[in-house]
Image (cartoon, grey):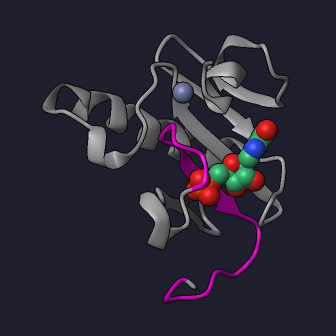
Amino acid sequence: MACLFCRIVSGEIPAKIAYRDDDVVAFHDITPQAPAHVLLVPTRHVSSLNDLTPADQELVGKLVYRAAQLAGELGYAERGYRTVFNCNAEAGQTVFHIHLHLLAGRSMGWPPG
Ligand code: 5GP
Ligand code: ZN
C-alpha cells in the first residue's frame, strides 16, 4: 500500500493543500507545532534523506525554494521561520516519505529539542 504522504499527494487522503506542482506538494500539518506549520513533500516517494541520490539534488532545492516562497506568501519572510528535515529515529522522523517542515509564527528555541 502507498505510504501516507503518497496518499495525500494522490488525493486519496484529504489535506489542506497550500501548493502543488508536478514535483512538489505542500500541505498544512494535521498537528501544527506553530501558528503556521506546512509540510513540503516530493510527489515521488523517497523514504528518508538517506535515500537521496545525486539526481535528487534539484528536487530538494525545489522543496527549499518553495518553502521560502510559501513563508513569504504567509507573511513570515521578515519575522523569520524555520525549515527542518527529520531523518530517522533520533531526529524524530515518523513518516517515511521525506518532508520539509516549514514552521513560523512564534519564537523558536535553539538548540532544538
Ligand atoms: P516527522 O515527525 O516525520 O518529521 O513529521 C511527520 C509530520 O506529519 C508530523 O508533524 C505529523 O503531525 C504530520 N502528519 C502525520 N499524519 C498526518 C496526516 O494524516 N495529515 C497531515 N496533514 N499531517 C500529518
Ligand atoms: Zn510516499
The image position of residue 54, as x and y in percent, is: 14, 32
In the current view of this chain or complex, which residue is farthest to the left? 54
The relative height of residue 100 versus residue 54 in the rendered view (above or below) is below
Asked if residue 75 shows in the view, the reply is: no
Based on the picture, tell me whether residue 11 belongs to the magenta stretch. no
Quick one: quadrant of the N terminus?
top right
Is 50 located above or below residue 54 in the figure? below
Q: Quadrant of residue 102?
A: bottom right
Q: Quadrant of residue 35?
A: bottom right
Q: Where 50 falls versus 53 (above or below)?
A: below
**Region rendered in magenta:** 94-112
Please tell me which residue is depicted at 59% across the width and 67% down the height of the picture: 80
Left or right of 55 on screen, residue 69 = right
Location of residue 55 in the rendering, given as x and y in whole percent from the top left corner: 18, 25
Name the residue: 52% across, 59% down.
Answer: 83
Q: Position of residue 24 (x, y in %)?
A: 52, 24
Q: Nearer the viewer, residue 75 or 49?
A: 49
Looking at the image, which residue is at 69% across and 41% down? 73
Report if residue 108 lies within the magenta region. yes
